[in-house]
Image: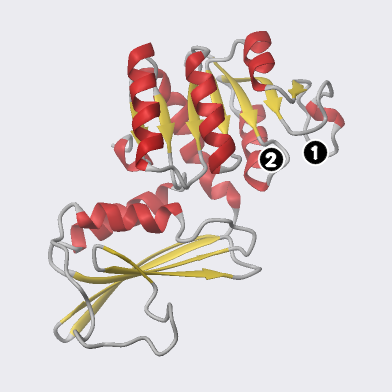
Amino acid sequence: MEQIKVVIAGPRGRMGREAVKLAEETPHFTLAGALDRRNGGSKLSEIGEGFSSEARIYEDIKECLFETNPDVLIDLTTPETGMYHAKTALEAGVRPVVGTTGFSEEDLKELRELAESRGLGAIIAPNFAVGAVLMMKFSQLAAKFFPDVEIIEQHHDRKLDAPSGTGLKTAEMISEIREEKQQGHPDEKETLEGARGASYNGIRIHSVRLPGLVAHQEVLFGGEGQTLKIRHDSYDRKSFMSGVRLSAEQVMKIETLVYGLENIIE
């Protein structure tokens, strides 16, 4: 397989550490550099995270992309930083793979137009776990037969956005084939604000944040005399790495923005 030169943003984060190990262990990946808020000028092997790579750490993305000339930027930081990094990468002729959530429709439109104008691929994935993507696809299928549905997503207590990108993406996918409807009793009243969760086209989304969790989601469907539950659990961030690898490979073959791993899984 053709070599892919990658730069990883956020190497000290929990996802970033796994991505560095992925790049180190994947024969057709070359780790050209890393972007970090500190440790500029150091090598990855020198920052005490168990890395063996001698790739240099940069604090400025433009300097990093100019000096390393990578094929792909893998960004696992925050929505604000991810948007800036993705835009800067495309402007520099580098294909971004972004694993943060919280992008607005305006953000996605801007990045799609930029990618297509440069003839470059870009992938933004709310969830890189293949099992989570299948959970979303199965839920979309089930919604054809069970229009009454609620989503419970559970994540670690360091997660900033709620609902999660996966929870919101699931609701969006279900809404593509489900007519909007309000669920529950038409006269229901919250005696405590927020008790029924957020609403997306009538789909209720409930967010749980607790230490000890990683990433978990259950989609509950109700029908007359029956319920259907579709659930996915990530117990370790290694579960996301197969999707990161697939995205870095597939982004080399496209010339537009793809939002969601389900669009590249065959």
Q: Is residue 139 above or below residue 196?
A: above
Circles 2 and 1: CB distance less than 8 Å?
yes
Q: CA distance from mark 2 to mark 1?
A: 9 Å
Q: Which residue is depicted at the point 43% across and 77% down?
A: 194
Instruction: Residue 109 in the image: state x and y as whole percent.
Output: 34, 32
Instruction: Residue 1 in the image: state x and y as whole percent.
Output: 47, 16
Which disc number belongs to residue 50?
1
Instruction: Residue 173 in the image: state x and y as whole percent.
Output: 26, 52
* Callout 2: SS: helix
Q: Is residue 62 above or below residue 39?
A: above
Between 109 and 243, the one lying in front of the other is 109
Which disc number belongs to residue 9?
none
Instruction: Residue 116 in the image: state x and y as whole percent.
Output: 33, 18
- Of mark 2 and mark 1, the one earlier in the sequence is 2
The disc labelled 1 sits on which kind of residue?
A: Gly
Q: Residues within 10 Å of mark 1 (few under 14, many from 20)?
A: few
Quadrant into which the C terminus falls: top left
Query: In the picture provided, is 246 more to the left or to the right than 215?
Result: left
Q: Residues within 10 Å of mark 2 (few under 14, many from 20)?
A: some
Count every numbered label the image shows and give the total: 2
Quarter holding residue 210: bottom right
Which color mode does the image show? secondary structure
Q: Which residue is depicted at the point 51% across and 16% down?
A: 94
Q: Which circle, 2 or 1, is nearer the viewer?
A: 2
Q: Is residue 18 above or below residue 134?
A: above
* Callout 1: SS: loop
Q: Which residue is mark 2?
A: 17
The disc labelled 2 sits on which kind of residue?
A: Arg
Q: Which residue is depicted at the point 86% across and 30% down?
A: 46
Quarter holding residue 197: bottom left
Between 251 and 9, the one lying in front of the other is 9
